[in-house]
Amino acid sequence: MVDVHRVKLPGVGVLHSFYTDDGGKCGVITHRSGHSDLISFADISDGADKSDKVSLRLSEDEAHTLAELLGGTRITEGLDKLDEIPGLSIDWFSVDYDDAIAGKPLGDLHDSGFIGLTVVAVVRGDSANPAPSSDFVVFPGDTIVVAGAPEKVAKAFSFYRSGQLAAAAAEAPPGS
């Protein structure tokens, strides 16, 4: 198994890196904004020139695509089986400082007009808070895991991001 090093980058996000069998070093910087940087670099402590570095900026969709092409993670492999259930989506939303939900209680999606959605967990750091209560306060850096119909999950994430979908969702016909 590959030994992955995790380093928090204050104000940026998290760097995960590992050494390859041929002595290279590979890493991914996951920014709080959702995009990622795929980097390959030489370790200066090994006497390498610090200019021996390659960086590639990836959007959130591009990062997910690259992960799938590289084989994904063991978690992704397990969740892929859930994609076979028609009408069910389990997805996660990374909370950033400028998101409407940051620093506020999670609330109840049903009370906000979202019927048929469940907050499965809020992940903070290395621990999960399964089935959090509506008064659970969400902070930047947290990841909210939601299950429901794909279009409803997307609307909930838009609501968490902007805080403005609550009125539109409440005006929608029941069951939408």
Image (cartoon, grey):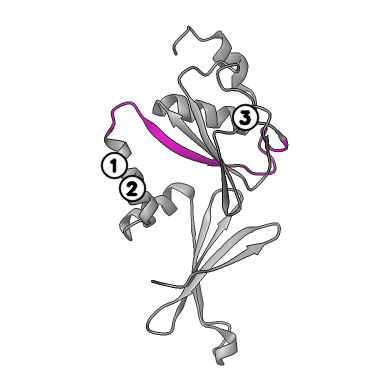
Q: CA distance from mark 1 to mark 3?
A: 28 Å
Tell me the residue at 43%/47% (across/down): 61
Q: Nearer the viewer, residue 56 or 102?
A: 102
Does residue 88 sit above or below 16 in this rendering?
A: above
Disc 1, disc 2: CB below 8 Å? Answer: yes
Does residue 117 sit above or below 28 in this rendering?
A: above
Other-residue count near label 2 (Cα within 10 Å), few / some / many at <14 / 14–19 / ≥20: few
Q: Amino acid at mark 1?
A: Lys
- Image quarter in which the N terminus is found: bottom left
- Image quarter in which the C terminus is found: top left
Disc 1, disc 3: CB below 8 Å? Answer: no
Give the residue at mark 3.
133
Q: Give, as a single range, the part of the protein colored magenta.
A: 85-103
Give the residue at mark 1.
81
Does residue 167 sit above or below 147 in this rendering?
A: above
Does residue 101 sit above or below 108 in this rendering?
A: below
Mark 2 or 3: in front is 3
Q: CA distance from mark 1 to mark 2?
A: 6 Å
Q: CA distance from mark 2 to mark 3?
A: 26 Å
Could you say whether the residue bearing mark 3 is in a helix, strand or loop?
Answer: loop
Mark 1 or 3: in front is 3
Q: Amino acid at mark 2?
A: Gly
Give the residue at mark 2.
78
Could you say whether the residue bearing mark 2 is in a helix, strand or loop?
Answer: helix
